[in-house]
Image (cartoon, rainbow, N blue to C red):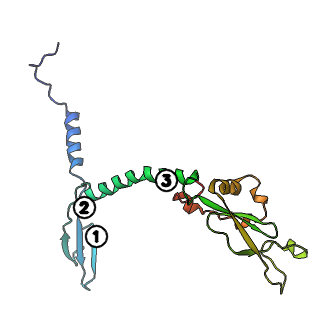
Amino acid sequence: MLDLERTPRPLRWYEWLAVLLLAGYATGARAEVYRCTDARGAVTFQDRPCVVAAAQTRVVLAPAPAYTASPQYATKRETTTRQVPRAAHAHTASRSGESAGAASYECRTGDGQVFYRHSACPRSVAAVEQGPSAHLGHGARTKGAAAKSVAVTSTRIARADACYEMRRAGAPGRSGRGHDQDVSTYDKNLGRDPCR
């Protein structure tokens, strides 16, 4: 049984020491700043008292402001969290092809290149090099050779199909792969990837 009339025992010395140390830490750190002006008029600020030859002024620091939550930031945060589900819902709708903006384009050239874009196809692209200069590499031409271009025809396809064709395993070997409309890593991290 609990005896409520009993007086509590006195604190031991190490308990008193702990209370005093905690009280000392609760007051916080303090810094003293001195403004020193030497004989030439140069001003320095330091944490130690000035030398005897310099004029000394003690700088009083204002205490750090107490933390208070701003109602303006709280309002913005609530607005952002309320918009996320709507944006996510619109994004899934566009991915499934239900909205009008969910179309992409399959672009074909006369020389056999096939590439995919989320915006309109260009009117023409550089022709694939064939013959003796083809071994020079992508974009390399012999001296005096003019750049040749090929007309492009476009077919509107579902965005999901275009994304699949750009990412499938055989895509790196496809002629025209270099013209695919790839999204940068920066845009992917911001959620601007049309294929997601």
Q: In which quarter of the image is residue 139?
A: bottom right
Instruction: Answer few, some or many: residues within 10 Å of disc 1's Cα (few below 14, many 20 plus, some between 14 and 19).
Output: few
**Three-letter code, disc 3:** Ala
Residue where numbered disc 1 is placed? 46
- Residue 90 horizontal/vertical position (percent): 49, 53
Q: Which image quadrant: the N terminus?
A: top left
How many circles with numbers are drawn on the protein?
3
Spatial CA distance of label 3 from label 1 is 59 Å
Residue where numbered disc 2 is placed? 31
Q: Are marks 2 and 1 in contact (CB under 8 Å)?
A: no
Image point 79% across, 79% down: which residue?
A: 148
State which tag comes first along the sequence, 2 or 3. 2
Spatial CA distance of label 2 from label 1 is 10 Å
Instruction: Answer few, some or many: residues within 10 Å of disc 3's Cα (few below 14, many 20 plus, some between 14 and 19).
Output: few
Instruction: Determine whether, in the image, residue 146 is placed left or right of residue 190.
Output: right
Callout 2: SS: loop
In the picture, the disc for residue 90 is: 3
**Three-letter code, disc 1:** Gln
Instruction: In this rendered view, identify the residue nearer to me: 137 or 103.
Output: 103
- Residue 8 horizontal/vertical position (percent): 13, 25
**Three-letter code, disc 2:** Ala
Image point 27% across, 73% down: which residue?
A: 45
Comparing marks 2 and 3, which lies closer to the viewer? 3
Comparing marks 3 and 1, which lies closer to the viewer? 3
Callout 3: SS: helix
